[in-house]
Image (spheres, grey):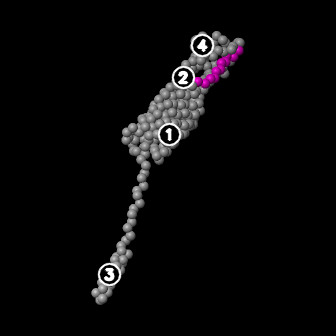
Amino acid sequence: MKRLLLALLSVIVLAGGGNAMAADMAPYYRAPPPVLVPAVSWTGFYIGGNVGGAATSINELWSPLPSSTTFGAFPITGSTGGASFAGGFQAGYNWQFAPTWVAGIEGDWSWANARGNINQPWVLDPTGAAVPGSFTSMSSTLDWVSSIRARLGYLVTPTLMVYGTGGAAWGKIDYAASNFAPATPPSPYATSTAFSNTQSGWVAGAGVEWAMTPNWMLRGEYLFYGLGGFPSVVVPSANYPALPSAYSWSNTNVGVGRVGLSYKF
């Protein structure tokens, strides 16, 4: 009986000690699983908007017909340019075909209102004297530009791309011209014309684009457009039908600097 009591007492003591040791042990802590950050992929369709500025450069020429000597006045020429706000949208597709290379195609359209003009008095041929009260005025206004371009980019980091771009371009340009000279007899000389034309050409440029998130991309870029011109429009004078005026506009160069924000699907 004594031996049985001692055995039971030993079991109780050992059980109590084990509980105390368990109480003294620090609880087991399991760290939460790591948060997985999705990898940035440039592949996919995107659409967005852009804002910036546009500047134009163009040469304009008035030619008195049938010739300078017959008309009695020298031609008038000038190099003009204008600048304005530009804004529009872009859409395209990127394909990340290597760890650090991205190819794509993009279309864009931007509104502008860049206007340039010349306004000069007539100069008599051959004396070189200015004609009092005379003028020839010519202008051109860029209404919008659009393009379809290929892009090729290099990833400096997984989220930062530098790229070059180039392709076909179009632009709508408003042309206007008029002139006037008092003459006696029999009456003053005057002509006037105004029209619009959509010119085609090419565009090239470069930029930097940052993938802020897997879906939002911010860019800054510069594009140079080389658009066609209007070689000649002959405008008769009601009072002098044998002495018309010819107006011509050279190719139009356009520089556009802008920033853009795009959403990738």
Single out the residue that lies furthest toward the right.
186
The residue at which mark 1 appears reads as: 46
Which quadrant, please, contains the N terminus?
bottom left
Could you say which is closer to the camera, residue 159 or residue 257?
159
What is the distance, in whole Å, between disc 3 and disc 4 at their CAs? 127 Å
Task: Please give the name of the residue rendered at 34% of the width and 77% of the height, measured from the top-left corner.
Answer: 18
Please state which of the two labelled residues, at mark 3 or mark 1, is closer to the viewer.
3
Question: Mark 2: which amino acid?
Answer: Gly
Q: Is residue 260 visible?
A: no
The residue at which mark 3 appears reads as: 11
Q: In this figure, what is the number of numbered marks? A: 4
Instruction: Determine which quarter of the picture holds residue 113.
Output: top right
Please state which of the two labelled residues, at mark 3 or mark 4, is closer to the viewer.
3
Please state which of the two labelled residues, at mark 2 or mark 3, is closer to the viewer.
3
Left or right of 160 in this view: 112: right
Question: Mark 3: which amino acid?
Answer: Val
Task: Please give the name of the residue rendered at 42% of the width and 36% of the height, measured from the top-left corner.
Answer: 103
Question: Mark 1: which amino acid?
Answer: Tyr
Task: Please give the name of the residue rendered at 54% of the width and 39% of the height, measured from the top-left corner.
Answer: 49
What is the distance, in whole Å, between disc 1 and disc 2 at their CAs? 33 Å
What is the distance, in whole Å, between disc 4 and disc 1 at their CAs? 53 Å
**Secondary structure beneath label 3:** helix
**Dot label at residue 229:** 2
Q: Is residue 8 visible?
A: yes
